[in-house]
Amino acid sequence: MKTIRTLVVSPNAPDTNSIWLYKGTMKYFNNGVWTTIGGDNNGGGDNPNIQSKILDVNITEDQFTQILNGQSVAIRLEEADSSYDVIAVRVGNYSYFLGRTIQANGTARYATETITVEEGSPVMNQVQALVTKGVISLSANFIGLAPEIVKLEIGDSSEIKAYNLSQLKSGFFFTQLDYGYGVGTWQSSTGGFAHVTTAYGNEVFYTIGADGSIVKDEDYIKPNEPYTIQLESSQIGTPIDDITASHVLKCGEIIIDGSTGPVTYTRSVDSTPTAIYFTSSKKDDTLQVLTYTVSTKTFTSSVANQKYTLPAATKTTLGGVKAGTNIADLNTSADLATVIGTVNGLLAQLRAAGVLIS
């Protein structure tokens, strides 16, 4: 089978995968020659001046392997020039025909193209020849093409299911669905799933049935989310919806949008299965606390004092004491009365500071 890519009107032979139309004669490339459609097989039809000019180039298997491995192989051929319509590369019992694609200033480029699909990824295989006077440089390119986008429709009617089944392929694929583009996976025995992003950045999830039906999955939660949830201040004090409630159970922080802008609350380590706490520090050293009650799906707000009060020291507990007034050192010649007065003054200060407790 031969696939015709384009219809070309030109005095020069086009790519060999094209229909060539010139001066009322239409041709296609077959078995190494341009053959008139609906006419004789002399390559020129009613106009023998439009005969394809073919340059035969013989290369070895090793040279062909080098070309397929990405190397360029130069072949010296005395009769080579840019006047030929087709380059016929002969490798043993096989021939590859390269049609001329462009010509300028005594140099011509020739190419043959085929498309193969390996593991779902289409690849263009292109063998090229650059011809100058007496020299032919052969090379190959393998160009990955954009994968096919599977267009699907939402619904479960007989018509929609039949259409989707005609489009679906087993495994992973790119898809266009409900005004968005995304990725999907599907197996004929178990069905599948699709994840689509719209032009406005909305993420939408769909369940694909084995019968070709497609329905939106409103309750799906992405495995890597949600770490952050954003709520309006008006939602504090009123029950939240079931989907948001399921997100709260897994999130690490909440952003509340209020009149002064967004405020971030971080999940507290003392949260429990029945009550989840989120906190945000304020500049006055108090703590704004959001308490989420799981049973009622409701947030409440409160303020906790973060200021630290130093407890008084006791005989069994560490704590704070006050500083005492300085007492001058005793003179070595001080009498007993002076010593007693100084010691008693020191004891009084220690009791007043809280170091000594009666």
Image (cartoon, rainbow, N blue to C red):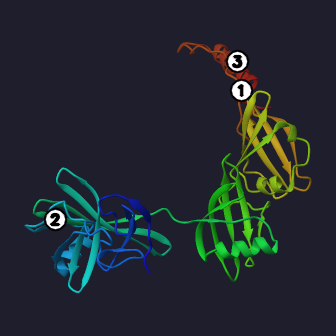
Question: Which residue position holds label 2?
Answer: 136
Residue 62 drawn at (x, y percent):
18, 79
Position of 250 relative to 129 (above/below): above
Position of 350 relative to 133 (above/below): above
- Spatial separation of the CA atoms under disc 2 and disc 3: 113 Å
Residue at 87% of width from left, 52% of height from top? 241
Three-letter amino acid code of the residue under disc 1: Lys
| Mark 2 or mark 1, earlier in chain | 2
Within the image, what quadrant is residue 210 found in? bottom right
Within the image, what quadrant is residue 321 found in? top right
Q: Is residue 172 left or right of residue 306?
A: left
Tell me the number on the disc at residue 283: 1
Question: Which residue position holds label 3?
Answer: 345
Within the image, what quadrant is residue 222 found in? bottom right
Dot 2 and dot 3 residues touching (CB under 8 Å) = no
| Mark 1 or mark 3, earlier in chain | 1
Residue at 58% of width from left, 68% of height from top? 173
Residue 248 drawn at (x, y percent):
78, 53
Residue at the farthest left position: 78
Residue 137 drawn at (x, y percent):
18, 64
Residue 271 drawn at (x, y percent):
78, 52
Q: Is residue 300 left or right of residue 77?
A: right
Three-letter amino acid code of the residue under disc 3: Gly
Task: Name the one closer to the observer, 118 or 1.
Answer: 1
